[in-house]
Image (tube, helix red, strand yellow):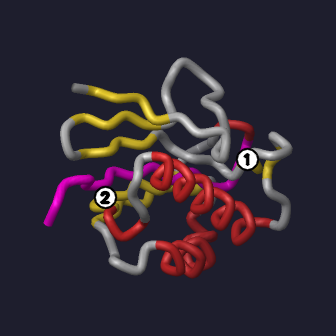
Amino acid sequence: MIRTISTDKAPAAIGPYSQAKIAGDMLYASGQIPIVPATGEIAEGGIEAQARQSMLNVGEILKAAGTDYSRVVKTTCFLADMNDFAAFNAVYEEFFTEKPARSCVAVKALPKNVLCEVEVIAYLGKD
């Protein structure tokens, strides 16, 4: 069975997709950009602020699915500028203390011209 996860505590999808899907014991979350859900605006303050808001948005989706950052097994991170890599990592490691597998790539552009986007896959089963 496949279930859709949706929460108003994370930004609504800005296209034809879901915030996340659960298939079996796995959660597949769409990429989260640094939109502040309460205002619909992009977090201000550069890469650190945008990374933090993206991580908070991921956290709300994880919470809506009944899990947390510790259950994330894989992340994919997109940066508009690889020069932001170290600053992004400093924020990232505050949230992903279990060090999931990760890919991090620079892209030409991201939706709404944000500086970063983060997507996750989490395990929901029992250990």
Residue 22 spot, x, y in % from top left: 31, 37
**In this rendering, position of residue 100 left or right of residue 119:** left
Tag 1's secondary structure?
strand
Segment tinted magenta in the rendering = 113-127
> To which residue does mark 2 refer?
74
Instruction: Where is residue 21? Give x, y as percent.
Output: 37, 34
The residue at 43%/60% (across/down) is 104
Mark 1, other Cα within 10 Å: few <14 / some 14–19 / many ≥20: many
Q: Residue furthest left?
A: 127
**Label 1 belongs to which residue?**
35
Residue type at tag 1 = Ile
Task: Name which of mark 1 and mark 2 comes first in the sequence.
Answer: 1
The quarter holding residue 14 reads top right
At a point 59% along the width and 76% down the height, the residue shown is 91
Taking 47 as reference, is 41 left or right?
right
Asked if the residue under mark 2 is in contact with the one under mark 1, i.e. CB atoms within 8 Å, the reply is no
| Residue situated in front as seen by the camera: 40 or 46 | 40
Residue located 85% across and 60% down the image: 44
Query: Residues under labels 1 and 2: Cα distance?
Result: 22 Å
